[in-house]
Structure formats: C-alpha cells, structure tokens
Amino acid sequence: MAGNANEEECPGTCEGCKSAESCPSAGNPQAKSMSLPPKAKIDVKHVIMVLSGKGGVGKSTVSVNLAYALSTHGFKVGLLDLDIHGPNIPKMLGIESHRLTTVGNKIEPVRVTGNLSVISMAFLLPDTSTPVIWRGPMKMSAIQQFLEDVDWGALDFLVVDLPPGTGDEALTVVQLAPNVRGAVIVTTPQDVATMDALKAAKFVERLEVPVIGIVENMSVMICPHCKEEIDLFGQGGGERIAKELDVPYLGSIPLDPEIRKAGDEGRPFILRSMASPTWKSVDKVMESLIRVVEE
C-alpha cells in the first residue's frame, strides 16, 4: 500500500521487474506480510476515518460533532486527532490546557465525558503556537503510539480526524488500526473542493476501505436579515459526487456563524440550541452517519 522505496523508478508493470519478488505491490503474499507491521492492540469495534481532499472544509467540525453524537447515544468513543501539524480538536472541545499523563506504561487520554476520550498532539506541545516540524517516519511512530500505547479502554468507536490529502497519516491508520469500518469524506459544494474529495474517496477505495458517506459542509448561508439562502460555494456538489461514487449522501450543513462560535468557544455545536435550523441540519447528518455505521 505504501509502495516501493524506489517507487519513482517503477516501470508500471510487475512482469520482468527486478524488484517484483520483494515488492508488496507485486501481489506477493510473503512480501506483503513482511512489509506491513502488525495491527495495533486496541480494543475497538469500529474505526471511522474522517477525511477531506483539501483543508478548510470543516473536517474537524464533523469529527467533533460525530464523536460527541455517538457518545450521547451511549457508545464508548475515542477521538484521535491526527492532524499532527495543525491539531485543533482540543480547542474545539475546550480542553486545550490539558496535558497527557501516564499510568504505568500507558498514556491516559483526556476524558471529556464518561463516554468520550481524546488524544491529540496538541496535548504534548508547550503552547498553541509551537509548530511540529516532523518528517513522515516521526509521524508514523507517533500514530503507532497514539493507537497502541494509550489506555483507551474498550471502545465502540474510534473517530480519527485526519489532515487534508492522501498522505502518510491515513496510510498508517489503515495499516495499523484494527477494524477500520470506513471513511467519511467531507467537502464543500464547489468544484475545486469536490474534485479533491473524489481523490480522497478513490484513495481509501484503493486501500480497500469503504466510503461510509459524503458530508457537504458550508452548503448554503442563511442571510441573518432576510433569511434567504445564499449559495456562497455553489450547491449540490457533495450529493453529485456521492451519486458518482454510489455511496450514501449523509446530508448538508449550512455555513452558520454559530458553528464557528461553537468551535472557538470549545463546545460542540450539537450541544447548542435545538431550535436552530442549522442544528437540525447537523443533527440530521449525525443521525444519518450513526445509522449507516450501525448497519
């Protein structure tokens, strides 16, 4: 899956290739077993990856609200923030001042509620402005620790918030995490976002991971004065690519200043006023997601 060390020299066909015997891409079972590390020993029924093809589409917002929604349905949930270079999950949950502790040889996750625990690189940084300047191997090692060396307990779901794109972090999760249930793809409606969302979907399909569904974020903006819908980023892009991929369309979430406020204030949007039309949209998406995952 991760490819050959000399991938740029690959002729594109295995026949006659000098590296075919040792290359996992050549379909050699022994080479595949030699190249892949063992699965992390974590007691989890379902791992859900949250992906986007590009940044700024609200992937972390979906991750936080999905994890919280699952936990309020009585499930034991872990939320793993793997956006190592830009970890925002603690800020969005109001727990950015916490630090990780160890008990014995295990790292203790930060407990948000009795059913929801969180791990993030942000808990290890001296302050919020400290950059993480790591190459791929360092990130892969950290991901392995976050999976295997954390005392998650018995989980029903582990929601993994991944950075934009199709790089090391997602590959490492697929290789190391047991029981990967599938991926949720988050996009905004415009073509430049849906084009990259399609890449993310095809990426996980290449890894033999199912796409659980597509979420269209920032679908419309409700004018605070006239209450008319304004299509800032176009309309229907998420539903279109869901049909193209033949996967569930989980729904749309409007662009609403209250969602931004919820993230800045560290309180998931689904805990806010149930009278808001936006809240109903978010709740509908989360209920669709839970229903698909449970099935």
Image (cartoon, rainbow, N blue to C red):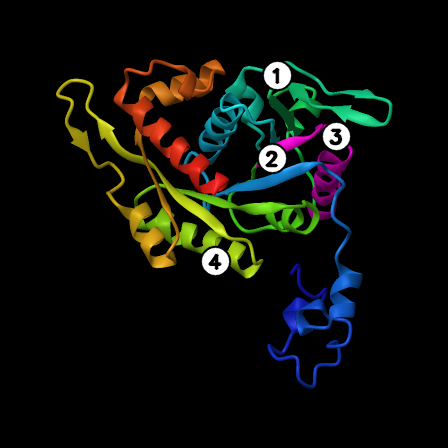
Q: Tell me the amino acid under the disc marked 4.
A: Lys
The mark that comes first in sequence, 4 or 1, is 1
Describe residue 212's horizontal placement relative to residue 238 as left or right.
right
Describe residue 40's horizontal placement relative to residue 279 as left or right.
right
Magenta residues span 136-159
Asked whether disc 1 touches disc 3, contact meaning CB atoms under 8 Å apart, the reply is no
* Residue pointed to by mark 3: 150
The mark that comes first in sequence, 4 or 3, is 3
Describe residue 262's horizontal placement relative to residue 77 as left or right.
left
Question: For numbered disc 3, what is the local secondary structure?
Answer: loop
Alpha carbon distance from label 4 to label 3: 31 Å
Furthest residue in direction bottom, as rendered: 16
Residue at (54, 61) in percent of width and height: 206
Q: Say above or below: 271 vs 40.
A: above
The mark that comes first in sequence, 1 or 3, is 1
Rendered image: mark on residue 158? 2
Local crowd at mark 3 within 10 Å, few (<14), some, or many (≥20)? some
Alpha carbon distance from label 2 to label 1: 15 Å
Rendered image: mark on residue 114? 1
Local crowd at mark 4 within 10 Å, few (<14), some, or many (≥20)? some
Furthest residue in direction left, as rendered: 226
